[in-house]
Image: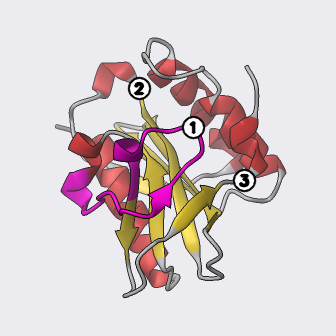
């Protein structure tokens, strides 16, 4: 596998990021194909707190986004991971995992309370994500609502994401 470089997005990579999200989710069974629109809206709203790209052999091949989220009535610093996308031709090579790990480390340096997401527990458990009895996301089955603690306070209540996640196709 080629070396993976991860860095914060630059203005010249915005079109690549859009294309990566379109291609990665084109045939995804539970996607509404709005991931690229979500990232654009987060950026436009000034809510794209952490936006990282993965580059290999001079080509931008992956992207991950983190935005602030409200968890219950907590006033702590919670972040929501998503979307994360890797071009189909290079999936399965550790690029997505590297983006997740790098992004989570960035959140730790920001002294975040933790990170929440909606996703596959089989994939995200490798990073320490798990379900919590009182953590929910409207309209999503409980087993797909995951959290990762950076502090001692467990996430409790409903996750409220940025309005960008409500965007329609």
Q: Is residue 51 left or right of residue 156?
A: right
Q: Quadrant of the N terminus?
A: top left
Badge 1 or badge 3: first in the primary sequence:
1
Pinpoint residue 58: horizontal percent, then vertical percent: 42, 38
Residue on which disc 1 sits:
139
Residue under the image location 21 percent in, 42 percent down: 122
Depth check, front residue: 131 or 112: 131
Q: Is residue 104 magenta?
A: no
Please determine whether, in this image, residue 1 is positioned above or below residue 28: below
Residue under the image location 41 percent in, 55 percent down: 6
Label 2 and label 3: CA atoms lie apart by 25 Å
Q: Residues within 10 Å of mark 3 (few under 14, many from 20)?
A: some
The residue segment tinted magenta is 125-146
Tell me if label 2 and label 3 are in contact, CB under 8 Å.
Answer: no
Quarter holding residue 27: top left
Residue on which disc 2 sits:
87
Residue on which disc 3 sits:
162
Label 2 and label 1: CA atoms lie apart by 28 Å
Depth check, front residue: 152 or 27: 152
């Amino acid at each position: 596998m080629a070396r993976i470089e991860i860095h914060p997005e630059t203005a010249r990579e915005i079109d690549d990021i859009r294309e990566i999200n379109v291609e990665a989710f084109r045939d995804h069974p539970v996607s509404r194909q709005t991931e690229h629109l979500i990232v654009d809206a987060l950026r436009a709203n000034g809510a794209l707190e952490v936006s990282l790209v993965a580059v290999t052999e001079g080509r931008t091949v992956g992207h991950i986004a983190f935005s602030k989220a409200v968890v219950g009535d907590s006033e702590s610093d919670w972040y929501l991971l998503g979307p994360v996308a890797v071009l189909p031709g290079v999936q399965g090579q550790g690029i997505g995992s590297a983006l997740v790990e790098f992004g989570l480390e960035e959140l730790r340096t920001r002294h975040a309370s933790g990170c929440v997401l909606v996703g596959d527990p089989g994939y995200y458990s490798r990073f320490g994500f798990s379900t919590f009895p009182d953590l929910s996301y409207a309209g999503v089955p409980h087993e797909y609502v995951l959290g990762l603690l950076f502090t001692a306070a467990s996430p409790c209540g409903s996750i409220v994401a940025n309005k960008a996640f409500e965007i329609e196709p």
